[in-house]
Image (cartoon, rainbow, N blue to C red):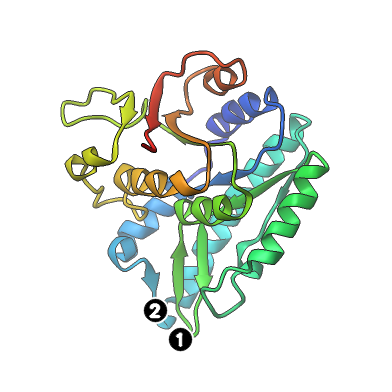
Amino acid sequence: KNPINLFAIRKIARQLAGLKGKIIVVHGTGHIGKAPALKYGYTKTKSLPSASVRTALKIRKDITQLNTAVTNSLNDLNIPALSIENTHFYGYFNRQWNRKGVKQIIDTLTNNKVVPVFYGNFLPVENGGYRVLSSDELVLAIARLVKPEKVIFLSDVDGVLDPDNKLIPVFKEGMFHDLKYSVNDVSGGMKVKVKTALQLKHYCGECFIVNGTKKGILERFQKKQDIYGTKISFL
C-alpha cells in the first residue's frame, strides 16, 4: 500500500500560496506510480498490454486520488485550483495532443486566477492497452503552447548532481552524456528531466531544477534572490 504523502504536498502547496502571476502545476506520480512500475515491469516498455487492463485502471485510480489530494491542498490554502483530466485532450484512443483545447482551458483558467493542475497518468491506446503519460512529457507539451516565462522542476534533491554528488549550478548541454538514467524509475529519473529541460529552450525564458522540500525555495524566485539549485543553460 502506498499512502499519499500529504505532508510533502502541503509543504509545496504553502510555497505556491506566496507566488504571484499565472501558475500552471504539473505533478508526477511519485511513489504511487513507482511501486507498480517495478512490480509489473513497465519501467522500460512504458505501457501495459490489454490483458492488464484491470491493473492499469487500478493504478489510474490511485494516481487520480493523488491528484485529488494535490488539488484539495491548493484549494485549502485559498489557491483556486482545478484538476485537468488528460484523457480528454489526447482523444480517447490516440496520442494526438489537442492543442487548441488545452490552450483554451489554460488561458481561460489562468486569466481568471485559477491554477490548472495537470498530472502524469496512464492513457488508453487503440489495442486496448495503456501507455504512460509522464509529467515531463506534459511539461514539454504545455510549454510549447503557452511559452512560459519560467519552468521550475521541483525534485527531492538540490538539483542536477555530478558523478561526485556535487550540485551543478549551471547545467550545459555538453554535460548530458555524463548523467545516468534511473533504471528503477518509470520516468527515467533526473536524466529524462534534464533532457526535457534542454528541449524547453525553444519554449520558455528560463528553466530550473531545485529541491521542492526546501523551505522558501519558490519564494526566492518571486523575490529575485539567488537560487540554490541548477539552472539549465539555453546557450
Q: Quadrant of residue 18?
A: top right
- Report which residue position mark 1 lands on: 127
Tell me the CA gap for discs 1 and 2: 8 Å
Is 175 positioned to the left or the right of 19 in the image? left
Report the residue at 17% width, 40% height from top: 178
Q: Residue furthest bottom?
A: 127
Viewer can see residue 220 = yes
Helix, strand or loop at label 1? It is loop
Instruction: Tell which of 88 and 146 is nearer to you.
Output: 146
Residue count near mark 2 (Cα–Cα under 10 Å), binned few <14, some 14–19, many ≥20? some
Q: Position of residue 102 (x, y in %)?
A: 67, 60
- Report which residue position mark 2 lands on: 49
Amino acid marked by disc 1: Asn
Amino acid marked by disc 2: Pro
Report the residue at 44% width, 64% height from top: 132
Helix, strand or loop at label 2? It is loop
Q: Position of residue 142 (x, y in %)?
A: 58, 53
Viewer can see residue 1 = no
Is 115 positioned to the left or the right of 97 in the image? right
Please report contact status of discs 1 and 2: CB closer than 8 Å, yes or no.
yes
Is 191 positioned to the left or the right of 152 in the image? left
| Quadrant in the picture for the C terminus | top left
